[in-house]
Image (spheres, grey):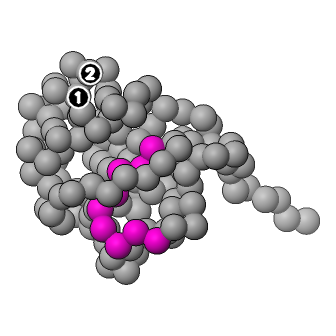
Amino acid sequence: MSLDISPEIPVGRQIIQRYGECRFVISELLYKCPVVVFSNKTNIWDVTLLPNDESILGLIPIILDEGHVDLLLLGCGEVISPLTENIRSEFKKKNIIVENMDTGAACRTFNVLIAEDRRVAAALIPVN
């Protein structure tokens, strides 16, 4: 006997199907660049492969335009860089928690939280 443990994703939600080889497959669309994934759409993120405070803080208006995001998962690529206190405090002022992790962990966490119908976004840097 086997059990299907894959989460059921609500209709119309984005799902990260694949990552690696400097690309993402999200809801059957291929992206070869950094992206910001919301529950209902994916945007290209105009950032270098090494985001800095300015580029991360630049996500705030993008997220606020989308509305209703409580948690931002920041997929930093293959190496996790600590977030500065300035970044955390600026997001906190907007009632958004930001968690940084490697891109693979951010992709997997996003899918689980979307399946739970949570208000989450993921900003993702591609990995090899």
Contact? badges 1 and 2 (CB < 8 Å): yes
Q: Residue at x 24, y 33 (%)?
A: 61
Identify the residue at horizontal 45%, vertical 44% (top origin). 38
The reply, left or right, for residue 24 in relation to residue 84 is right
Q: In this view, does 21 lie above or below 81?
A: below
x 54%, y 33%: residue: 118
**10 w.r.t. 29: above or below:** above
Q: Quadrant of residue 19?
A: bottom left
Q: Which amino acid does label 1 sit on?
A: Phe
Amino acid carrying label 2: it is Lys
* Stretch of the chain drawn in magenta: 30-38
Q: Where is residue 3 in the image (x, y as percent from the top left)?
A: 82, 59
Q: Which of 106 and 22 is in front in this view?
A: 22
Residue beneath the point at 46% across and 71% down = 30
Question: Residue 110: x percent and y percent?
Answer: 48, 48
Q: Does dot 1 land on a helix, a strand or a loop?
A: helix
Instruction: Give the residue at mark 2.
Output: 94
- Horizontal side, residue 106 vs residue 14: left or right: left
